[in-house]
Image (tube, rainbow, N blue to C red):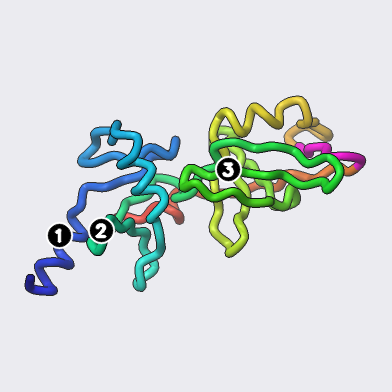
Amino acid sequence: MDEALLQRLREASGLRIDNEGRFLHEGEPIEHERLAAALHKNLHRAPDGRFATRLGTDWAYVAVDDVAFFVRSLAVDEAAGELRAELLDGRALNLDPDELSIGHNDALYVKLPGGERARLSRAAQLSLSDRLQEEPPGTFSIKLGDRRHQIGQTHLGVEQTVKP
């Protein structure tokens, strides 16, 4: 196939990740669980810096409404003072609680190893609710073990949106 045509097809994929972590195709949610899981698992940065996903040898660009990565669930390791996360792409990671931040509509985000940011799902965010404390109004922290971790502010959204 002509490389220019292939590039136009990749750019016109109609794939998008909404701010809840759902894959959509031309505005409609992809409801097939295994397909959505495969799209998340194969999400990556294309050479030009945009997000893309791969199925087999084919790949296409993905528009991202907020962030491309999402934390499905969190567990707390009190002894180590760490957060253990499962991402929508299937990865299990230890996260640094000092990398938590609050963004638009009070959504929680965390910086992943490697530098990308991930948004916590509602379930993951709720799993921290009994550990959250508001100190001065508008300033939050979470307690893990004997230590408090300040939650920063982030302004994700517009600068993270990638439109192929």
Q: Residue at x 33, y 56 (%)?
A: 53
Query: Which is nearer the N-term, disc 1 or disc 3?
Result: 1
| Residue named by callout 3 | 86
Q: Is residue 28 above or below residue 109?
A: above
Q: CA distance from mark 2 to mark 1?
A: 8 Å
Residue range in magenta is 140-146
Q: What residue sits right under mark 1 in the picture?
A: 9
Residue at (14% x, 66% y) in the render = 6
Question: Where is the N terminus found, in terms of image quarters?
Answer: bottom left
Residue, disc 2: 60
Q: Secondary structure at mark 3?
A: strand
Residue under the point 26% across and 47% down? 15
Magenta highlight on residue 145: yes
Where residue 125 sits in the image (x, y, percent)? 62, 32
Mark sitting earlier along the chain (3/2):
2
- How far separated are the C-alphas under marks 1 and 3? 32 Å
Task: Tell me, yes or no, whether the two marked residues, 2 and 1, touch with CB atoms within 8 Å.
Answer: yes
Q: Main secondary structure of the magenta part?
A: strand
- Circle 2: residue type: Ala
